[in-house]
Amino acid sequence: MVVDSLVFEWLPEVRLLDYNEQTEELLLTTQNEIMVIDNEGEIVSQFNPHIEGPSYVGNSDFGWIFDSRGGLICYAHHSFDVLDKAGNRIKRIPYPTEVKYWMILDFNPQMLFNYKVDGAEKLVVMIPAPIFSDSKSKAFQDSVELIYSIDVKTDEARSVMAKTEDNVYRNLEAYVDPGWPYMTNFSDGKFAQVFNADSVIYVWDAEKNRLINTLSIPVDSRPDYQTIPFGDRGEPDRYKVNANVYSTGDYIILNSINLIPESIYKEIRKLPRWWESEELASAQRKYSKNEYLIFDEEGFLGNLEMNIGKVDYYQLSTKSDFLWYQRTYEDERDYRTFLKVKIVPVEE
């Protein structure tokens, strides 16, 4: 249910990055610029961090969040950069491990989070390709550390939320996908974590590095896929996967999607201008499907019915009782509309 909206007068496309629960500010990105707007839609700050200078973060980045001071933290190349709200760098925090390479990850997972414990601010970061790693190997799925907790003040880092012994990627004995975790920070240091091919959601206490609970995904909504032997070239067909996980303070929302199988998609990509082809449109109609499932910390509650009109693909989690969405329009507008959406039970 839409309970409120925020109109921001701005023509170019923007994307929501983060929400500050204390100041009620939104963090946006647009045409390489970073913007902070207040709850009236007024610009608080605007800067381009990709222009070379004292606060340059690189030609691109991998995410931004508000920090506990009201400033910003950027997932930059080779470091996590702490900046003030105007974009001036305060410090750099080095990566906790060497990185082999970077790539665009499927389904746009958030890879940078923060929380406070006993007055200390902690980052939780996902490093998708550490040095000497090969995701198409049993060793990668068994032992490579992908998630770290970092103290913002001391830079001290430690591995957290590693794959459990019963995780599907440690027991398949074959390759389905790289096995990256998708996470959401729904309450202080509590995280919900899911993997594309797994049948459960993991609920973690990141500070204690303790698994709190596993939430079983209903059988009809579980991933469906084929595998290939480790080391083989190509990609297996995947029919249904866990695409991402979002949250409010009370709820965990799993996005489950049906995919065009890779074997079919591979043939479509051989066509001239395949992205505009009727073959692609037909495959999308046949295979593509989105499903949203709602959980609390104890288990599955039901399916989410989306009745809020046309909205952007990206959903912004909060630790409050709502999500942020961006309204989309058929025609061009000189403003952007952000929707504050609450989850409410459906009356029988």
Image (spheres, grey):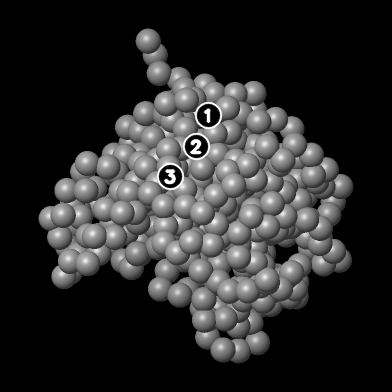
Q: Which residue is mark 2?
A: 254
Q: Nearer the viewer, residue 206 or 338?
A: 206
Q: Are marks 1 and 2 in contact (CB under 8 Å)?
A: yes
Q: Nearer the viewer, residue 293 or 334?
A: 293
Residue 9 percent location from the top left of the image: 36, 61
Q: Residues within 10 Å of mark 3 (few under 14, many from 20)?
A: few
Q: Amino acid at mark 2?
A: Leu
- Between disc 3 and disc 1, whose residue precedes? 1
Check disc 2 and report its element: helix, strand or loop.
strand
- Asked whether the viewer can see residue 101, the reply is yes
Q: Which residue is mark 1?
A: 217
Residue drawn at x 43%, y 44% as measured from the top left: 226
- Between disc 3 and disc 2, whose residue precedes? 3
What's the distance in space between the residues labelled 3 and 2, CA to CA? 22 Å
What's the distance in space between the residues labelled 1 and 2, CA to CA? 9 Å
Image check: 184 left or right of 313?
right
- 177 in relation to 254, above or below: below
Residue 53 percent location from the top left of the image: 60, 89
